[in-house]
Image (tube, rainbow, N blue to C red):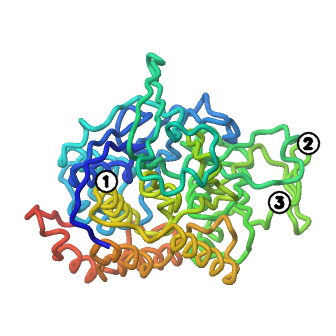
Amino acid sequence: MVSETHQSKKVCVIGAGPSGLVAARELRKEGHRVLVLEQNHDVGGQWLYDPNVEGEDPLGRTPSLKVHSSLYTSLRLISPREIMGFTDFPFSVKKGRDMRRFPGHRELLLYLKDFCDWFGLRDLIRFNTRVAYVGMLDYYGTSTDDVVGCEDLKWVVRSVEKKTQIVMEEVFDSVIVATGHYSQPRLPSIKGMDAWKRKQMHSHIYRVPEPFADEVVVVVGTSLSGQDISMELVEVAKAVYLSGKSLDISEGLSKVISKHENLHLRPQIDCLQEDGKVLFVDGSWVIADTIMYCTGYSYTFPFLDTKGIVAVDDDRVGPLYEHTFPPSLAPSLSFIGIPRKIIGFPFFESQAKWIAQLLSGKRTLPSRDEMMQSIKELYHSRDVAGIPKHNTHDIAEFEYCDRYGDHIGFPHLEEWRKELCLSALRNADTDLETYRDSWDDHELLQEALQSPHFTQHGAQDFPL
């Protein structure tokens, strides 16, 4: 629903990664007063590479992690740059930089810095500031029903300046959580894991292959990061054993395994033994030096106290209407960037626009009961489809992103953007080692580069 009234709110955005930056841009555009709190020294979030992992728990089992970014040195984008930009700020090629279609991670960081500078967002950000606590103001243990629908709900945000340890406590009309979800390691439960004496680590702290020279490494997880890291380790390690839930692998991974004598596919691990033995469920075993868990990440909001209204249950953050709004606290509390398996930046942008317009009073949400019903229907449809709870926020559906945008009249994803995304996925499936540098979608690429998305600023697009 659209309203003519307009309110200016004081809003705190937590995180200056892609979702936090576009949130700040949209909030200011809508007339709100914005403060972004960022724990690191610069923008970028996950894309701000951090080589210093020595002090981090190798399995990430500590309550709060020192290192936010999970990027490894050689990481390149798995999507072509053309599909990744925000709608009004294309991820164009720039002379003197990484001009590849699938550039290294630093190029995306530079894009985010360009975005920040182009829209003058840096003045809205307080860097080197860790958020320690976010909670409702004047919440004195009354029932959650007393909070529900409270129009004048305010939030206390307590933050710590990292260098001086000075604590600040401030009050906001609204809080937007934009902290990402690729930092907190998600680990499997394996018999003997706690007693295994050799090196175990999560890929969160993997950076370069050299420390694994001449080692026998078991990589757990055949996702893209597991495949990528295995291909890098195989060049220096004595042997790499890639352990997955299924031995039904892509043509691309099969080609890589057949090419390297020291890269082996194995089923799931059955148990670990103290002498260094790793037993697989098919009865085979290997004595390993290192086990690396490429098993994904969990959602975590250690600073957030909603008195149990919002909880994380097996990686289902809920209840959230449209993966964004807790029905009884919205729109004063919202989350950007929860969904996975989407074309991220345009989706974050649509989330940011919706939140900004709700806070200004330009739009309104459905009733709390209607939002709760929508969430129940989502959970039910996921259950019926046999989708595990921890995959609740995996979208993998362009149509959902388009329907989401319809709430605010946000443009649908362009056909070329969808097709380029699918083309990259298909190529990775068949040619895992070469798909970033060898592609057959030239006509789609030209369509993209000649579209309004790329020509809107009249910028020169250099040949790719």
Q: Amino acid at mark 2?
A: Glu
Examine the rendered structure and indicate whether residue 424 appears above or below residue 150.
below
Residue 298 visible from this viewpoint: no
Disc 1, SS? helix
Examine the rendered structure and indicate whether residue 198 appears above or below residue 400.
above
Location of mark 2 (residue): 274
Give percent across and percent down for residue 271. Answer: 88, 55
Location of mark 1 (residue): 22
Give percent across and percent down for residue 396. Answer: 51, 75
Quadrant where the N terminus sits is: bottom left
Residue 183 visible from this viewpoint: yes
Question: Which image quarter: residue 265?
Answer: bottom right
Q: Amino acid at mark 3?
A: Ile
- The residue at the point 18 percent across, 66 percent down is 463
Marks 2 and 1, Cα distance to the nearest angstrom? Answer: 49 Å
Q: Amino acid at mark 1?
A: Val
Give percent across and percent down for residue 55. Answer: 61, 28
Location of mark 3 (residue): 269
Residue 11: which disc?
A: none
Binning the other alpha carbons within 10 Å of mark 1 as few (below 14), some (14 to 19) or many (20 upward) gives many
Question: Which image quarter: residue 168?
Answer: top left
Give percent across and percent down for residue 340. Answer: 51, 65
Query: In terms of sequence position, does the residue under pointer 2 or pointer 1 come before the other?
Result: 1
Examine the rendered structure and indicate whether residue 199 appears above or below residue 355.
above
Question: In this rendering, would 76 be left or right of 93?
Answer: right
